[in-house]
């Protein structure tokens, strides 16, 4: 989302980033405003949009919960401000949606200007739940990392110790651990279990799992205990800190995305763009050139890693031949269509198409 704000600023837009978290970083051209989480955030965002003279509000969300989207739909209906909502995941099983929830989700999405989904998997789920096709656009949620994401810095000591091992380095990570139905959504538990299996064959290998911020402490504790119980501390590092993900992926020989469910994962495309052979669970479709294994199968993950180790140069050539696409132009096209349909402020529409933007875009995270 920060990259999106920066790229819009490159196009000449005045961008206001409304963030519910502290420490949000952005280009100096991007105005960052802290907004409260919870039910009142839509009202606060609409007030900011009114005060700043925004032409469009782009909300980023997870889970497709209609109760979270409905206030923003109400803002659009009350003010005429077009609202685009990006849905980055939908991990709930479709059969768990009641008829009422399906109806309300369809009505809420129908009241928004557009719903941008994280790839076709999330779009297909929303279609099955009754959302109108013309309200949905599947977008690759990936923008090329910027220079500051890849700048060399002093490595934390725990990562550096593993990074300097003689064998191949396997990296993975997430912004925050999440429990889903009692399971580790982002697969830290699978990562450390697969590491143990791999190390029996390649004791020189190293494994680093990067976590952006604390979350799901029981999951973190369990995986750290697994590492201790199996005496893997010399080779496996679980690091919690604000190190840029792309910098960590770039340092690895192989990147792993061991999720039990997913959207179109940004980190997978980041790693592939950086030329790092990438392995991911088959929880959803993956980009061409990405190795997959059956979700939850740690033995399968271990076998895939060992196979890649056997010909790392060949794996790198395969990755280099499958440079992933990014989604910026698709997002701009959504903005164009939404503004054209609503007849909203032609200056912004013209700017998106031909040059510097005339007005402003709000990016809500």
Image (cartoon, helix red, strand yellow):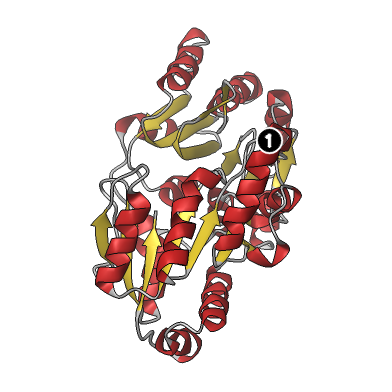
Residue nearest the observer in this picture, 182 or 289? 182
Residue nearest the observer in this picture, 223 or 51? 51
Q: Which residue is mark 1?
A: 98
Residue nearest the observer in this picture, 192 or 348? 348
- Residue at the image position 70 percent from the left and 50 percent from the top: 121
For residue 245, side relative to residue 125 (left or right): left
In the rendering, at what x and y percent does residue 39 appear?
A: 37, 44
Can you name the residue that lies furthest to the top here? 229
Q: Secondary structure at mark 1?
A: loop
Q: Quadrant of the N terminus?
A: bottom left
Q: Quadrant of residue 119?
A: bottom right
- Residue at the image position 62 percent from the left and 38 percent from the top: 91
Do we see residue 352 in this rendering?
yes
Question: Is disc 1 surrounded by few (<14), some (14 to 19) or many (20+) residues within 10 Å?
Answer: few
Residue 292 higher or lower than 138, as above or below: above
For residue 175, side relative to residue 19 (left or right): right
In the rendering, at what x and y percent does residue 144 appear?
A: 49, 64
In the rendering, at what x and y percent does residue 61 appear?
A: 49, 50
Q: Quadrant of residue 262?
A: top right
In the rendering, at what x and y percent does residue 149 appear?
A: 38, 56
For residue 88, side relative to residue 213 (left or right): right
In this rendering, the count of numbered labels is 1
- Residue at the image position 40 percent from the left and 21 percent from the top: 217
Residue 86 higher or lower than 91, as above or below: below
- Residue at the image position 26 percent from the left and 72 percent from the top: 52
Do we see residue 29 in this rendering?
no
Residue 216 higher or lower than 88, as above or below: above
């Amino acid at each position: 989302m920060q990259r999106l704000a920066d790229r819009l600023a490159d196009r000449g837009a005045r961008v206001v980033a409304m963030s519910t978290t502290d420490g949000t970083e952005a280009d100096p051209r991007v105005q960052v405003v802290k907004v409260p989480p919870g039910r009142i955030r839509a009202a606060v965002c609409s007030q900011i949009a009114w005060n700043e003279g925004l032409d469009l509000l782009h909300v980023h969300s997870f889970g497709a919960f209609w109760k979270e989207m409905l206030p923003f739909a109400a803002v659009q209906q009350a003010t005429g401000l077009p609202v685009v909502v990006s849905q980055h995941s939908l991990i709930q099983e479709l059969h768990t949606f009641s008829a009422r929830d399906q109806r309300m989700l369809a009505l809420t999405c129908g009241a928004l200007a557009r719903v941008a989904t994280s790839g076709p998997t999330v779009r297909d789920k929303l279609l099955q739940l009754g959302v109108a096709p013309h309200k949905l656009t599947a977008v690759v949620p990936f923008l090329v990392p910027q220079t500051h994401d890849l700048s060399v810095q002093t490595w934390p000591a725990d990562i550096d110790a593993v990074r300097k091992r003689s064998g191949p380095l396997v990296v993975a990570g997430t912004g925050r651990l999440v429990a889903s139905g009692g399971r580790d959504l982002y697969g830290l538990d699978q990562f450390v279990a697969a590491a143990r299996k791999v190390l029996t064959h390649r004791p020189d290998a190293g494994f680093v799992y990067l976590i952006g911020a604390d979350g799901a402490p029981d999951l973190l504790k369990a995986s750290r205990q697994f590492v201790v119980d199996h005496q893997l501390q010399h080779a496996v590092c679980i690091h919690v800190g604000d190190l840029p993900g792309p910098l960590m992926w770039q340092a690895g020989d192989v990147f792993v995305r061991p999720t039990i469910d997913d959207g179109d994962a940004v980190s997978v495309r980041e790693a592939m763009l950086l030329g790092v052979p990438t392995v991911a669970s088959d929880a959803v479709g993956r980009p061409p050139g990405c190795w997959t294994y059956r979700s939850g199968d740690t033995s399968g993950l271990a076998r895939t890693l060992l196979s890649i180790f056997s010909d790392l140069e060949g794996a790198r050539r395969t990755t280099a031949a499958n440079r992933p696409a990014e989604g910026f132009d698709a997002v701009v096209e959504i903005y164009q269509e939404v503004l054209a349909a609503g007849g909203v402020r032609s200056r912004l529409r013209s700017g998106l198409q031909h040059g510097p933007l005339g007005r402003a875009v709000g990016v809500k995270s």
